[in-house]
Amino acid sequence: MYTIKDLQSIVEKELSAQQFVEQPEGLYLPIEYILGVGGKRIRPTLCLAGCYLFNDEIKPAIKPALGLEIFHNFTLLHDDVMDNADVRRNQATVHIKWNPNTAILSGDAMLIKAYQYIADLNTNSLPSVMALFNQTALEVCEGQQYDMEFETRQDVSVDEYMKMIRLKTAVLLAGSLKTGAIIGGASDEQANLLYEFGENIGLGFQLQDDYLDVYGDVETFGKAIGGDIVANKKTFMLINALQLASGDLRKKLDEWLIEENFDAAKKIEAVRAIYDKVGVADLAREKMHYYFNKAMQALNKVDGKEAMKEDLRQFALKLIERSR
């Protein structure tokens, strides 16, 4: 019997056994670097879990699972270039350690590698797996485009934001679970229920990320608090605050959004105080729990190994209820 922890260990072992560096080294070293700087390996683990729910034999799902992890890191590599981010997982980003052109080209190579790994599947499920991956990969790109467009808009609605995070974050979690389920021989209905579980967990996960950026603790959150506020990033928190704040509160919020010369700590404190007054923290928590409950309802309808289902419940709970 496997647990989620066992599956995570399998992913780490298999990933570390892969040989990514070929010639020319300048193309492949950044791939080895980005895959070696850590990460929770959530997506490949979920892929293996989706398979194991329905089938004791998980070996056919290992290469596709690694492909999903390679694809996820490809998106991070290119996102870092677009965001001009200096650090990823406490290490220099690829475009900083090398240069932007290297990051773009190595990212392109990672996408091709992802396809090679996902297609390394000797079963009748290959066409379904590839169709799902194609859909998911395009949706992730659509989500990134929406995210970039939101940077220059002040009228982003909550519904638009939820659509964006569904595409940018949730569909890859959902697609990872469904990929494993397909390989494991699940019916379409069961695979779709698992997709629904992953999709809702992904939405809740991103909302929690938004919340923790404002109210988290740097030691447990793993990155600086208030980065979204400093960057005027359109998050669930800011969008709701813009809709709810009125009078002097709205005026102060607008002033902080257009101010170019500011002390970051003062801006974070001031905007957080506005969030407190309009109650966006409670709204975020309510929305998180709404999606978590939807996820649990879907998971409860899934057949398969009860022990793995319980592991997935606890795994989801940890994602949603990360410490402040």
Image (cartoon, rainbow, N blue to C red):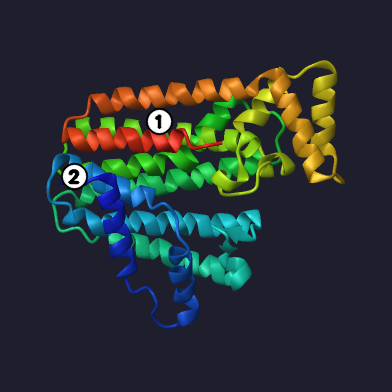
Q: Is residue 70 above or below residue 237?
A: below
Q: Which mark is residue 69?
A: none
Could you tell whether 130 is left or right of 92 in the image?
left
Whether pointer 1 and pointer 2 mark residues with C-beta atoms closer than 8 Å, the reply is: no
Place of residue 40 in the rendered image (x, y in percent of width and height, measured from the top left): 41, 51
Mark 1 residue element: helix
Could you tell whether 254 is left or right of 42 in the image?
right
Mark 2 residue element: helix
Which image quarter holds the C terminus? top right
Tell which tag, 1 or 2, sits nearer the viewer. 2
Could you tell whether 136 is left or right of 142 in the image?
left
**Three-letter code, disc 1:** Asn
Q: Is residue 311 above or below residue 250?
A: below
Residue at mark 1: 200
Residue at mark 2: 52
Q: CA distance from mark 1 to mark 2?
A: 21 Å
Query: Residue 262: which quarter of the image?
Result: top right
**Three-letter code, disc 2:** Tyr
Residue found at x 85% / y 40%: 259
Place of residue 210 in the rendered image (x, y in percent of width and height, measured from the top left): 58, 36
Q: Is residue 299 above or below residue 117?
A: above
Count of number-bearing discs: 2
Question: In terms of depth relative to the viewer, which is nearer, 292 or 29?
Answer: 292
Place of residue 239 in the rendered image (x, y in percent of width and height, measured from the top left): 66, 28
Question: In terms of depth relative to the viewer, which is nearer, 148 or 203?
Answer: 203
Place of residue 162 in the rendered image (x, y in percent of width and height, measured from the top left): 52, 30
Residue found at x 65% / y 48%: 224
Q: Is residue 96 above or below residue 310?
A: below
Query: Residue 186: which quarter of the image?
Result: top left
Earlier in the chain: of badge 1 and badge 2, it is 2
